[in-house]
Amino acid sequence: MRIMSEQDSGIVQSLHPLVRRLLAPNPSAFTFSGTQTYLVGRGEIAVIDPGPDLPEHIEAILSATDGERIVAIACTHTHRDHSPGSRPLKAATGAPIVGCAPLALDDSGPRADAAFDRDYAPDRVLADGDSIAGEGWTLQAVATPGHTSNHLCLALPEAGALFTGDHVMGWSTTVVSPPDGDMADYMASLNLLMGRDDRIYYPAHGEPIERPQRLVRGLMGHRKQREGQILRLLGDGAKPVPTMVLAMYGGIDPRLHGAAGRSVLAHLIDLERRGLVAPDGECWALAA
């Protein structure tokens, strides 16, 4: 299977008799080569993560499904590179929007909704275990909060596959950004996946993951390592988040330092709840 790059946007690639993918033309430091939209089924189609509201991408979806019928538009979560395309696609096809719940953030505290699609309006919200079906396929919702509070994965049992959205990606670790992103929830959701027997993951960014249990185990270990780094850094004295980011993420693209800081903050909030650290003005310190 050929690895997709940003030059492949708009080109349909078949991954399984029931699964095709299309790459949206939105590459960035946060989306890798772009958001991958998945087409599930033949004849009767579910579109997973229709992507950003870009006319060329919506046209590519419609062209790829010409002669078929889109019966569901499913969204894993409501970041702007995933769900806004649901509205023009619904207008063009009449298919219902299903999947994650709309996001409603509390107004208190620092805001984290700049990247959220506030206009997302599903016709049906899928709770954990709910399903939709078409000719030869079934999609079952698996609630995986953490990256966002409304994040869903979607299982396709006929292929032993799990569409993982941004919960597990094929190119990078997931950003967990408070107040909506929650590290404890994210770790619990990874642990949930460890108990499943999916054969393959289809992430929204990056290539299919053919040894999913191994990757999830590694992601959990990685987060535990980050937690240990934070505790060791604070063992030398109180520090602000940017100082910790420079010590922990020295080799990454500086454009990603802000996102890394959000994940560090998510770890700190989790550690505070567990009584291990405490805020100290603009800094964080080990709990007394």
Image (tube, rainbow, N blue to C red):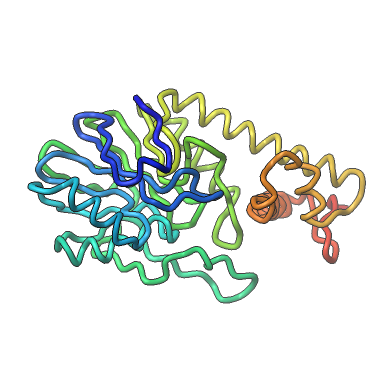
Front residue (pair 62, 237): 62
Which residue occupies 84% across, 52% down?
Answer: 287
Which residue occupies 46% across, 69% down?
Answer: 104
The vertical placement of 199 against 85, above or below, is above
The vertical placement of 42 against 148, above or below, is above
Which residue occupies 47% across, 31% down?
Answer: 194
Of the 4 image quadrants, the one containing the N terminus is: top left
The reply to whether residue 273 is in sight is no
Q: How many marks?
A: 0
Residue with the most extreme right position: 236
**Residue 219 placed where, x, y %?**
57, 34
**Residue 115 placed where, x, y %?**
50, 63
**Residue 59 placed where, x, y %?**
23, 56
Left-right relation of 53 to 68: right
Left-right relation of 201 to 174: left
Residue with the most extreme bottom position: 107
Which residue occupies 57% across, 40% down?
Answer: 173
Front residue (pair 208, 180): 208
Residue with the most extreme front position: 7
The reply to whether residue 219 is in sight is yes
**Residue 94 placed where, x, y %?**
14, 63
